[in-house]
Image (tube, rainbow, N blue to C red):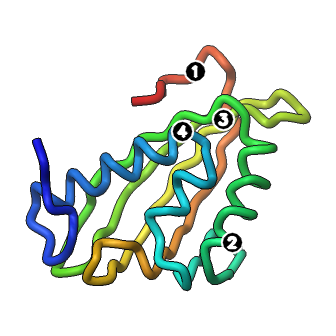
Amino acid sequence: MTQNLKPPFTEETARAKVKAAEKAWNTCDPDVVAKAYTPQSDWRNRDEFFTGRDAITAFLKRKWSVEASYALNKELWAYTNNRISVRFEYEWQHAHTGQWYRTHGNEHWEFDTDGLMRRRDMSANDIPINPEDRHLTKT
């Protein structure tokens, strides 16, 4: 099924956009993920603020050097013309300590007319879990 994943979003295209983002993030490839953002995309990720694809790529390389065995699930929460809000959950193992975590959070996305994300605002909390309590797998 070929879909136009550009604004204005419908429920179907918003859900497809969320699943496309989930799939890209689950590659843990910063270059693949960064292509979904405008060259000057503005990000807030927890307490970090930065702009641009180079900064996004650097951030993701640093992130995935610590967050091993990363498995993410994203869920459409709401959408409008050129904005999407997402609820997400991911599990990962700290590369240095071996501790497993489940991270819960929300993202707010704003897109340009070509469907590239020009703004991403993310809030999240990490909860330590036991390995036997994991329930996520890559989709």
Instruction: Indicate which label's residue lies in the foreground, 2 or 4.
Output: 2
Q: Earlier in the sequence, mark 1 or mark 2?
A: 2
Near mark 1 (Cα within 10 A), the count class, few <14, some 14-19 or many ≥20, is: few
Question: Could you say where residue 18 lies in the image, as x and y percent from the top left?
Answer: 31, 54
**Residue 112, which numbered label?**
none
Compared to residue 56, the image places residue 1 above or below, namely: above
Circle 4 residue: 27
Residue 23 coordinates in the image, percent (x, y): 41, 41
Q: Residue at x 83, y 34 (%)?
A: 95
Q: Which residue is mark 1?
A: 133
**Amino acid type at mark 3:** Trp
- Image quadrant in which you'd find residue 71: top right
Q: Are marks 3 and 2 in contact (CB under 8 Å)?
A: no
The answer for how far apart the CA atoms under marks 3 and 2 are is 24 Å
Instruction: Tell me the mark number nearer the camera, choosing from 1 and 2.
Output: 2
Residue found 52% across the figure and 81% down from its top: 41
| Front in this rendered view, residue 103 or 30 | 30
Residue topped by disc 2: 54
Mark 4 → mark 3, Cα distance in angstroms: 14 Å
